[in-house]
Image (cartoon, rainbow, N blue to C red):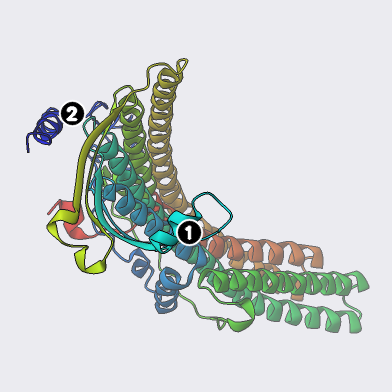
């Protein structure tokens, strides 16, 4: 016991005096506004990324969108890749934490040896006397090794891996939110194409009636041939526009199929001619704490934490690395004697290694780790600034588009009345067909602009929800 006691005394002294040499982590400050300029009295942002996000797509009151959004979470391949990346990061955390504990090994072996019986050498007589006997040797050994984390290097590595795993979890949330937002925009755009097609179908019927009226007037000698040609041109152009809508709709349908993990050939969405869009009102009273729920901000902040831990890993290289080794084993010529007391062997040791000179490499690693930390801090702050910009942009767009929709509705109503009056005047011979063409074109443009304004409000609502980090609930708004 007097041999191993000093070793344990030294080891325990080192362990109890151990300390982390890396800097303590503090979340870096980021520029913030006390309120959103485009939304009114919103409170200052505060971290709240861990709050539960709601199924925000329910706000659009569309059962088909609800079904597709749910399928994105389980079938989208980008989301599946993010899930796998998160699982890999968690496995790395477990691997790094395992280094904090001792490793235990078990070894065993058996050998058989003997000498040769050649008669030509000088030892031939001795070999015969010995009977050329072979000997056996059996061994069993239980060993343990442990690297005490005196300077906090292993803990810094494990903490850095945990921060990376948290960043991967936020990346997963980002991938889900991105896929869901892209799906919603594509689906709402597809339904807008359906609404445009329904609008063009009624317009084509009107153009066909106008062509028929013009043809009758030409046959009666009242209208010129140019009136008929103008009516035919207008009808053909409208049909070409309808074909373009079909092409765009098909592309959107293909994109939706890929988002839900299906081949486009195995996916189809029925046309809806009487679709009534819902434009959700994003509550102005939602606190700006939701901005911190953006997963990309959470991921950037966790990468700052990881970079901070790497500074500690680099600084730990200035200090000696220590390791404890212990083993207990036996060796005997017979298996029956392998575990007897006289055959037992043991060893216990403490080793230390210190780098004395490396040409400034250690200083360079610390400087590099510090620079990498500064880089992640700058990126974090840029992500926060961009997030505020996203929200301000979408709030401004929401307000302006609401005003535009009202004005588009007024313009469409007035254009419809002008079209009808001009057509009546043409029938009575008071105006030329050129005025009819102009009035009809203006009316169609106004109707399509109204449909587009409604669609723009929907897609802007999706963008605003994404900018805020996802869905919300009343409990989140009130802070309960």
Residue at (30%, 49%) from the top-left corner? 293
Query: In the image shown, does 148 or 186 lie closer to the viewer?
Result: 148
Rendering coords of residue 213 (x, y %): 79, 81
Crowd around label 2: few <14 · some 14–19 · many ≥20 (10 Å): few
* Residue 17 in view: yes
Q: Describe the element under mark 2 as helix, strand or loop.
A: loop
Residue at (29%, 25%) from the top-left corner? 320
Residue at (25%, 51%) from the top-left corner? 143
* Residue 175 in view: no
Q: Nearer the viewer, mark 1 or mark 2?
A: 2
Residue at (27%, 48%) from the top-left corner? 97
Which disc number belongs to residue 459? Answer: 1
Mark before the other along the chain sequence, 1 or 2:
2
Query: Mark 2 highlights which residue?
Result: 19
Residue 325, image quadrant: top left
Q: Describe the element under mark 1 as helix, strand or loop.
A: helix
Q: CA distance from mark 1 to mark 2?
A: 54 Å
Quadrant of the frame with the N terminus: top left
């Amino acid at each position: 016991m007097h041999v191993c006691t000093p070793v344990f005394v030294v080891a325990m002294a080192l362990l109890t005096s151990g300390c982390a040499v890396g800097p303590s982590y503090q979340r870096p400050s980021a520029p913030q506004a006390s309120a959103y300029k485009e939304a009114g009295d919103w409170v200052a942002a505060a971290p709240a990324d861990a709050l539960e996000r709601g199924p925000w797509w329910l706000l659009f009151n569309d059962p088909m969108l609800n079904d597709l959004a749910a399928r994105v979470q389980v079938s989208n391949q980008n989301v599946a890749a993010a899930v796998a990346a998160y699982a890999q990061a968690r496995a790395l955390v477990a691997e790094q934490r395992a280094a904090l504990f001792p490793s235990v090994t078990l070894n065993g072996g058996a050998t058989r040896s003997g000498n040769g019986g050649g008669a030509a050498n000088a030892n031939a007589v001795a070999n015969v006397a010995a009977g050329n006997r072979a000997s056996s040797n059996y061994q069993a050994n239980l060993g343990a090794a442990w690297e005490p984390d005196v300077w906090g290097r292993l803990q810094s590595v494990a903490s850095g891996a945990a921060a990376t795993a948290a960043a991967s979890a936020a990346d997963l949330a980002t991938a889900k939110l991105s896929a869901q937002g892209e799906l919603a925009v594509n689906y709402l755009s597809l339904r807008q194409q359906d609404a445009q097609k329904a609008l063009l179908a009624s317009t084509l019927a009107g153009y066909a009636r106008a062509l028929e009226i013009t043809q009758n007037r030409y046959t009666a000698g009242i209208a010129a041939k140019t009136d008929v040609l103008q009516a035919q041109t207008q009808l053909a152009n409208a049909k070409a526009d309808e074909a373009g809508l079909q092409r765009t709709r098909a592309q959107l349908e293909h994109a939706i199929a890929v988002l839900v993990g299906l081949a486009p050939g195995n996916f189809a969405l029925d046309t809806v001619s009487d679709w009534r869009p819902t434009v959700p009102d994003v509550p102005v009273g939602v606190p700006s704490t939701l901005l911190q729920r953006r997963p990309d901000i959470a991921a950037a902040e966790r990468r700052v934490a990881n970079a901070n831990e790497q500074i500690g890993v680099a600084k730990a290289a200035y200090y000696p690395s220590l390791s404890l080794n212990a083993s207990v084993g036996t060796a005997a010529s017979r298996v029956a004697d392998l575990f007897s007391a006289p055959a037992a062997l043991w060893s216990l040791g403490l080793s230390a290694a210190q780098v004395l000179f490396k040409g400034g490499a250690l200083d360079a690693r610390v400087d590099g780790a510090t620079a990498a930390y500064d880089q992640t801090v700058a990126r974090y702050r840029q992500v926060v600034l961009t997030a505020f910009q996203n929200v301000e942009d979408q709030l401004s767009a929401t307000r302006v588009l609401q005003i535009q929709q009202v004005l588009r509705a007024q313009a469409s109503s007035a254009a419809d009345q002008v079209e009808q009056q001009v057509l009546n005047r043409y029938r009575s011979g008071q105006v030329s067909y050129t005025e009819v063409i102009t009035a009809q074109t203006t009316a169609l443009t106004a109707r399509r602009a109204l449909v587009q304004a409604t669609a723009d409000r929907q897609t802007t609502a999706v963008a605003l929800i994404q900018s805020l980090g996802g869905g919300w609930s009343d409990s989140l708004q009130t802070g309960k």
